[in-house]
Amino acid sequence: MFETLSRGFRAARNKLQGKVELTEDVIEDAIRDIRVSLIEADVQLAVTKRFLERVKTKAVGEIVKVSAEVRGKKVTLSPTDHFIKICQDELTAIMGPVDTSLARAPRGTPTGVMLVGLQGSGKTTTAAKLARHLSKQGWRPMLAAADVYRPAAIEQLKVLGEQLEMPVYAEDTESNPVEICFRAMSEARRLRRDLVVFDTAGRLAIDEPLMKELENVKARVKPKNVFLVVDAMAGQDAVNTAKAFHERLDLSGVILTKLDGDARGGAALAIKEVTGAPIKFLGVGETIDKLEEFRPDGLASRILGFGDVVGLMKDIGDVIEDEEKAEKDAARMLRGHFTFVDFLEQIRTLQKMGSLQEIFDKMPFFPEGLPAGIKLDDRELIKIESMIRSMTKVERTRPDVFDREPTRVDRVARGSGRKSEEVKELLQKFSWMRDLMGNIGQQAGLLGKIPGMKQLAMARKMREMVKMQGAGLGPGNPLSGLADSMLEAAVASQPGGFGGGSRTPARFKSASVQAKRREKRKQQRKARKKGRRR
């Protein structure tokens, strides 16, 4: 979702490669690409100018230390490292600091959270997401339907409340929204709920009647928190909307929604700078579990192409219910004991974490983005799951049976609605992944719980090894070619090629082909022995 922003910072980083001094000309050339990407991402021009001025002021004439001590280890630094560090600090500062905790009401009074915003921004869904998120932190929320102008919104909130097993206070569409909110607070006291999330009305555009109604609701129920729900895809309009609401309602914070779509990310950089109201949460999907706390440092790291390992580990922790079992499974798989049952569990874990693109955005493996032509298609995981579910228990736990009985491949293909070639490709990549897991052990660290991460870690280490060999390793160098081949193999080894239709390199033969060769050699040895006896 931040590809437009990341592109400019990657270009600036590339232009600084090999520079030994951060002169004004060098800096100006680098920030030109950043300026273009910020404007393309719909960041306000005034915000862009102020940001780049601060970066330039700090970078020009910077005395670059060629080495530093990091946790007792000596690391080599470059002007590029210093420039990127300045950019990261400024990006973090422009979006933060952020405190995602709620302001609490006095003891005995439910804490009110009032959601406001325009129609279509996703207030109703966000109300349920926020209630679910806060319930996991120990709150006992109740939802209140105050959008009487849209009966469908009331029904939607009731359905979401049933899914969450939370009470929803609602009245008929003839009732006064202000009184509905007031009576919802009384109902929360009766039910001993300590939090009420108000889903208020919206309009297609800001108008005086809407703002007056929201002001009356705020004056009547005195919510401790007023959050604006704004569509991130609106770009600069999102910032203007936030500014108008903040002037009238004194917002506690902002919730950006639809960041899983084609949002260019400009609103995330500009809202805090323009309005002073911090972004509190991000909506990153349509389902009610797709709400995450906003972390400026993590987002800045992702924009710069360094991923967000902290956020990724949090996502993994949220979906792994039994940590002890996960650790035992990881240790077993690292010894090469990897079955289709394990593979299926890993796929389901990935699906719970969100889209593949979102997961890869948080990974630090590819600072320049994924290789060109690689597309992450979540449907490939569904295809793989259908093929594994069509296998028998024996086939899942002992995949070698496919070598002895090739007809099983056709049966699995028919059962999953796929082609036999797709099942064979799955078996081929599974065999290579199992062997590789046993070989590289714990190189991928905590990310080893995700299928395919060990291949990517190995490819990354190979790239680093090539880089450490010294300058002058161009495209014609055999070591560079080997690194590129490793990276290509790592990407190709992902389930289904991650939607790219990529093929596993010919040197990685399937288990069935290897079995046939072993059988052929066995027959040749028998023939030779028989000849000697004669």
Image (cartoon, rainbow, N blue to C red):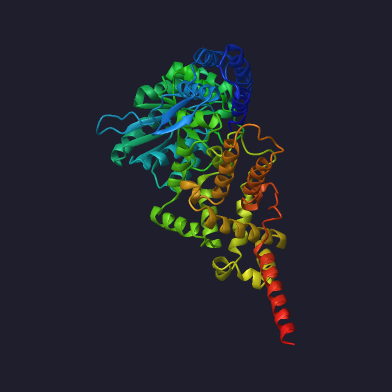
Q: Nearer the viewer, residue 466 or 508?
A: 466
Asked if 87 appears above or below 155 in the picture, the reply is above
**Could you say where residue 447 lies in the image, as x and y percent from the top left?**
49, 47
**Could you say where residue 287 lies in the image, as x and y percent from the top left?**
52, 43
Asked if 50 appears above or below 308 in the picture, the reply is above
Q: Residue furthest bottom?
A: 534
Res 14 quadrant in image: top right
Left or right of 310 on screen, residue 266: right
Asked if 443 appears above or below 7 in the picture, the reply is below
Q: Nearer the viewer, residue 114 or 371?
A: 371
Q: Is residue 325 visible?
A: yes
Q: Residue furthest left?
A: 107
Q: Nearer the viewer, residue 317 or 202?
A: 317
Mark count:
0
Q: Nearer the viewer, residue 319 or 130?
A: 319
Q: Is residue 149 visible?
A: no
Left or right of 75 on screen, residue 167: left
**Could you say where residue 140 lies in the image, as x and y percent from the top left?**
34, 41
Work out which quarter of the rendered image holds the C terminus and state it.
bottom right
Left or right of 13 on screen, residue 217: left
**Could you say where residue 286 lies in the image, as x and y percent from the top left?**
54, 41
Left or right of 498 on screen, residue 153: left
Q: What residue do we see at 55% from left, 53% from top? A: 347
Work out which quarter of the rendered image holds the N terminus and state it.
top right
